[in-house]
Amino acid sequence: MKLVKRIIIGLVIAFAVFYLVTRPQDAANAVQGAAGAVWGAGVAVTQFFGALVGG
């Protein structure tokens, strides 16, 4: 099972590097979108806990 996991991780990394080299603008857009999603989730969680504590 460890070998399969290593192969899958290696393939994902290889694809990411290939995508970065061949389509840098699209890769940058994907990273910006992912960062925006993480930021939005953080804001939502903060608002949730603020509303929870605030009553």
Image: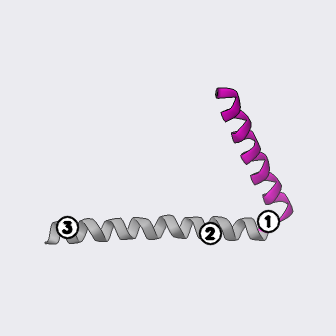
Specify the farthest residue to the right.
Answer: 22
Residue 46, quarter of the rendered image: bottom left
Marks 3 and 2 sit apart, C-alpha to C-alpha, by 30 Å
Q: Residues within 10 Å of mark 1 (few under 14, many from 20)?
A: few
Q: Earlier in the sequence, mark 2 or mark 1?
A: 1
Q: Nearer the viewer, mark 3 or mark 2?
A: 3
Q: Nearer the viewer, mark 1 or mark 3?
A: 3
Residue 51, quarter of the rendered image: bottom left
Where is residue 49? Give x, y as percent: 25, 65
Residue at horizontal 82%, vertical 66%? Answer: 23
- The stretch of residues the image draws in magenta is 2-24
Type of colouring: one colour
Circle 1: element type:
helix
The amino acid type found where label 2 is placed reads: Gln
Instruction: Please give the residue where the numbered disc 3 appears in the rendered image.
Output: 52
Instruction: Please give the residue where the numbered disc 1 appears in the rendered image.
Output: 24
Q: Is residue 43 left or right of residue 16?
A: left
Circle 2: element type:
helix
Instruction: Please give the residue where the numbered disc 2 appears in the rendered image.
Output: 32
- Along the line of sight, the residue nearer the viewer: 11 or 21: 11
- Along the line of sight, the residue nearer the viewer: 33 or 6: 6
What secondary structure characterizes most of the magenta part? helix
